[in-house]
């Protein structure tokens, strides 16, 4: 739809950019006549400028967009424009809630604001969620203080309190925000679903609201991104296996070669699922602390099961190759989940990578060299 900026006091149309005269739109790129999303439902005039009013009920398109982002489709462009938005009909004394401009985070927040009058201050986190953006510094003190000044927030509200997500705390120095802007930072609950009760209680959080829960379903819903990342390497591996089958039996029928390639891919598929799916899903139940170890252990178990129960007999040479290569594949994919999990810290991840990555490279490299030696030996008739 087109954004028609309407002054709620005079009813006149306003087409000026934000220049400090109170008529510009307080969202980047939402000038008069601009195409805006369907979740924008009108505008509210403030002394600092025009604020788009957002819907608090998600549309089917929002749900589909969230599902696509989970599977990595358009993930890096799944964002909203930073600026100030309005939920309901907020006034000068309404709370100011701060969020990231990752649309999934934004949607989770606005769907909990049904019946609540509030301002939503969206920071430019480059399309990254609150927690990750806080760790990267994009949801941080500099962006927050600069956005407050640019939006002239002190002219929109009479109070001086900002409600930030609890998971943004690592990136924000609350004392610096108050020194620079006069606004006090209050950290809200971990989950947006607890926000209505938090606001109703006068910005008071219960112990349960502060608890970070990362259960089975929370972990499982994050695995599609890890699986999608393996598609391209998997296709390359299948192509290589097809070429190996072709070199071994150049006169074999095409379908037989394809079947052979996919059959050879099965052990690698198991290693991929062990690292990218089962390790995150079963994370707290796998012994050990390091993600690389957890992934390696599941990869090792899969390797043993495959070599024992494979439909075709596997000799010790092939089994050794699998043992050297498959567990490292699982371990590496499990390590990718460190950036998504609440079980890690930055220093712990760095330490683990310094130790695990070289070991995985050595093991997998030894497996590849061993396989190359076997192929060469058979080619010249030694083996």
Image: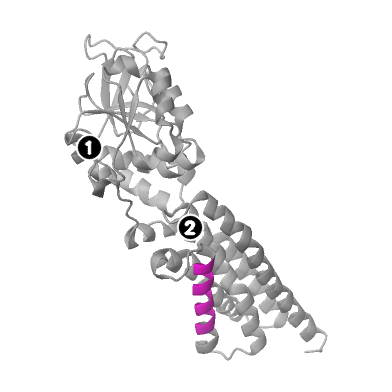
Helix, strand or loop status at disc 1:
loop
Near mark 1 (Cα within 10 A), the count class, few <14, some 14-19 or many ≥20, is some
Q: Position of residue 189 (x, y in %)?
A: 28, 42
Judge whether residue 302 is colored magenta.
yes
Q: Nearer the viewer, mark 2 or mark 1?
A: 1
Name the foreground residue: 38 vs 233: 233
Which residue was labeled with disc 1? 204
Instruction: Using the image as rendered, state which of residue 192 and residue 235 is in the foreground.
Output: 192
Residue 321 position (above or below residue 107) = below
The chief SS type of the magenta part is helix
Provide residue 5's location: percent of width, then percent of height.
31, 18
Relative to 281, does residue 75 appear above or below in the rendering?
above
Q: Residue at x 52, y 57 (%)?
A: 336
In the rendered view, how is the structure colored? one colour
Cβ atoms under marks 2 and 1 closer than 8 Å: no
- Is any part of residue 31 visible from this angle? no
Q: Secondary structure at mark 2?
A: helix
Give the residue drawn at x 64%, y 74%. 242
CA–CA distance between discs 2 and 1?
33 Å
What range of the chain is rendered magenta?
Answer: 293-305
**What's the residue at 25%, 47% (across, down)?**
207
Q: In this picture, is 381 found above or below 79?
A: below
Classify residue 105 as left or right of residue 267.
left
Image x and y of residue 365, in percent: 70, 69
For residue 337, the mark is 2
Q: Quadrant of the N terminus?
A: top left
- Local crowd at mark 2 within 10 Å, few (<14), some, or many (≥20)? many
- Indicate whether residue 10 is drawn in magenta: no
The tag earlier along the polypeptide, 2 or 1, is 1
Q: Classify the position of the C terminus by image quarter.
A: bottom right
Left or right: residue 228 compared with residue 89:
right
Q: Quadrant of residue 249?
A: bottom right
């Amino acid at each position: 739809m087109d954004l028609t900026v309407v002054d709620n006091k005079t009813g006149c149309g306003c087409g000026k950019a934000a220049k400090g005269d109170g008529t510009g739109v307080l969202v980047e790129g939402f000038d008069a006549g601009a195409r805006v999303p369907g979740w924008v439902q009108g505008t509210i005039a403030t002394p600092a400028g025009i604020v788009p009013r957002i819907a608090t009920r998600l549309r089917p398109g929002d749900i589909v967009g969230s599902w696509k982002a989970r599977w990595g489709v358009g993930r890096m462009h799944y964002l909203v424009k930073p600026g100030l938005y309005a939920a309901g009909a907020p006034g000068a004394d309404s709370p100011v809630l701060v969020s990231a401009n990752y649309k999934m985070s934004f949607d989770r927040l606005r769907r909990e604001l049904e019946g609540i009058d509030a301002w939503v201050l969206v920071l430019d986190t480059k399309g990254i969620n609150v927690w990750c953006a806080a760790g990267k510094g994009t949801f941080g003190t500099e962006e927050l203080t600069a956005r407050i000044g640019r939006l002239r927030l002190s002219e929109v509200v009479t109070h001086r309190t900002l409600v930030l997500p609890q998971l943004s705390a690592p990136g924000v120095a609350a004392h610096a925000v108050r020194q620079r802007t006069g606004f006090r930072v209050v950290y809200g609950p971990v989950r947006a679903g607890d926000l209505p009760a938090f606001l109703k209680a006068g910005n008071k959080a219960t112990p349960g609201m502060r608890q970070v829960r990362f259960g089975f379903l929370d972990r499982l819903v994050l695995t599609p991104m890890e699986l999608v990342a393996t598609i391209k390497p998997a296709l390359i591996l299948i192509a290589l296996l097809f070429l190996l089958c072709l070199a071994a039996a150049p006169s074999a029928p095409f379908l037989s070669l394809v079947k052979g390639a996919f059959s050879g891919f099965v052990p690698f598929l198991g290693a991929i699922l062990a690292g990218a799916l089962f390790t995150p899903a079963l994370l707290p139940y796998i012994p050990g602390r390091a993600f690389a170890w957890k992934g390696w252990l599941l990869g090792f178990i899969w390797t043993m099961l495959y070599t024992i129960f494979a439909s075709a007999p596997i000799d010790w040479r092939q089994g050794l190759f699998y043992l050297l290569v498959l567990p490292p594949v699982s371990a590496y994919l499990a390590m990718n989940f460190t950036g998504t999990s609440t079980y890690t810290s930055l220093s712990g991840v760095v330490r683990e990578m310094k130790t695990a990555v070289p070991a995985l490279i050595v093991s997998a490299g030894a497996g590849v060299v061993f396989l190359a030696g076997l192929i060469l030996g058979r080619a010249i008739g030694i083996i």
